[in-house]
Image (cartoon, rainbow, N blue to C red):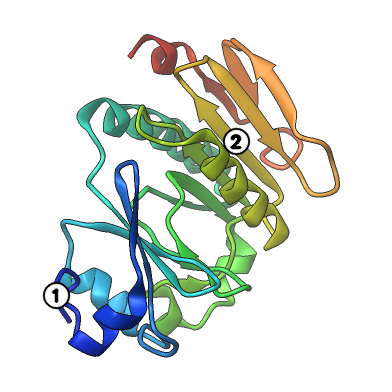
Amino acid sequence: MAILEPPPSAQRQQGGEWQENRLLLNAPPGLLAGDRFFELCQANPALRMELTATGRLIIMPPEGAESGHRNADVTIDLGLWNRHVKTGIVFGSSTGFTLPDGTQCSPDASWIEKSRWEVLDPVDRKKFAHICPDFVVELRSETDRLPVLQDKMREYIANGARLGWLIDPQSQRVEVYRPGQDVRVLENPQTVSGDPELPGFVLNLEPIWQT
């Protein structure tokens, strides 16, 4: 399946639009059902793609070097903490998940409690596993629209995430999301704590602000 040259019938129905650096396409019903979206992503590894619950396909370019460096810092710190406590599984920005509402997306960093991960079907784990991470991080790049990321964070929480961080290096601000609570905004913090959901995990933000 070629993403840039869909069948003529699909071209007529999709009605795409550009939103800054993202291409949004309305996929015809059923076109990306089942494993088809996973197969599409595997066939186009150079592209970053997500699928909304309403069937809208979002195509994004690979991240820039600065964003990739920041993502790596977050994932490394999360991984080192988890290696010590051994309570869950850590995932990087290239990992896709299928949320309960059908959204298929890839947080910049995420963590799933080990007991929840281990009960998943082994076949499902090899694809975009049907599970919402317990903890998600989205790191805003210079081309990301803040309202889009804020909507995405609310979607994670609505689908079962227990903690979410939206990190904005441009304003040096962190938005903390939890179910049933107002969003907590931290202005220019040097660290942010994962307690009580991730006991003992503290992310040092100084390298992210300085990148």
Callout 2 secondary element: strand
Q: Which residue is mark 1?
A: 5
Q: Is residue 208 above or below residue 93?
A: above
Q: Where residue 201 sits: x, y (%)?
A: 61, 31
Q: Is residue 198 above or below residue 42?
A: above
Q: Where residue 67 sits: x, y (%)?
A: 31, 30
Most foreground residue, 110 or 170: 170
Q: Where residue 183 sits: x, y (%)?
A: 75, 34
The amino acid type of the residue labelled 1 equals Glu
Most foreground residue, 30 or 19: 19
Cα distance in 3D space between marks 1 and 2: 36 Å
Residue 169 falls in which quadrant of the image?
Answer: top left
Q: Which residue is mark 2?
A: 165
Q: Is residue 117 above or below residue 166?
A: below
Horizontal arrangement in the rendering, residue 14 relative to residue 165 (left or right): left
**1 or 2: tag closer to the N-terminus:** 1
Circles 1 and 2: CB distance less than 8 Å? no
